[in-house]
Image (cartoon, helix red, strand yellow):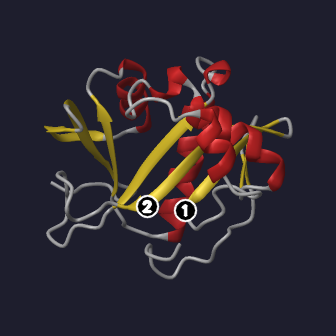
Amino acid sequence: MTELGAVAWPPAPIRTERLVLREPEARDRAAFIELFASSEVGTYIGGPRPRDELERAVPEVPGRRPGLFVIDLDGAMIGMITLNRRDAERPGHVRPDAGEAELGYMLLPEAWGYGYAAEACAAVLDWCADALPGEPVVLCTRTANDRSMRLAAKLGFTEVGTFEEYGAEQWFGVWSSVTPSG
């Protein structure tokens, strides 16, 4: 990842009990468009994007960049997970120099409710703990997003605080592979 330090990218595909987390491929293009055009997915991230705009904008191999994992179930993309450096200009940080690794995820609505997000995010957090030992990972979600709030708790994120951003109250939490002392 360009900004996450000396991490080789892409990593070998990560396999879980039911999923493969891998680099995007050309066969994922339609699923990327569906993901960003979905009104259900867009509910908590500023709304869906127009499908015709996405058809023009999404490259043949979408999302191929350090920090982006496709969530693959039985050979088909059902969502994505991202790890990015949190922009220092945004509210919510746990380090004085900012730039924490931030976990993001989106799944197609038909994949909701089966535990895929928890399984995939836990695998990426395990990978991150090995690739970036001791690095805190942050997560930000709207407090109104009950599913995302439950997932954050299930993954072991602890609340740092809340703040207003994008016209809504945001929950901000941190996860660490290092056991806190004290």
Q: Which mark is residue 84?
A: 2
| Residue at 36 percent of width and 19 percent of height | 146
- Given contact means CB atoms under 8 Å apart, are the residues at marks 1 and 2 in contact? yes
| Residue at 44 percent of width and 73 percent of height | 4
Left or right of residue 14, residue 42 in this image: left
Q: Which mark is residue 67?
A: 1
- Residue 123: image location, x then y, percent: 59, 48
Say what secondary structure mark 1 lies in: loop
- Residue 15: image location, x then y, percent: 74, 49
Mark 1 and mark 2 lie on one chain; the one further toward the N terminus is 1
| Residue at 54 percent of width and 43 percent of height | 122
Relative vertical location of residue 88 with respect to residue 69 in this rendering, above or below? below
Left or right of residue 50, residue 4 in this image: left
Relative vertical location of residue 85 with respect to residue 35 in this rendering, above or below? below
Say what secondary structure mark 2 lies in: strand
Nearest to the observer: residue 71 or residue 60: 60
* Residue 79 visible within the image: no
Amino acid type of the residue that numbered disc 1 sits on in the rendered structure: Gly
- Residue 2: image location, x then y, percent: 50, 77
Quadrant of the rendered image containing residue 117:
top right
State how many labels appear: 2
Nearest to the observer: residue 166 or residue 151: 166
| Residue at 43 percent of width and 29 percent of height | 47
Left or right of residue 141, residue 63 in this image: right
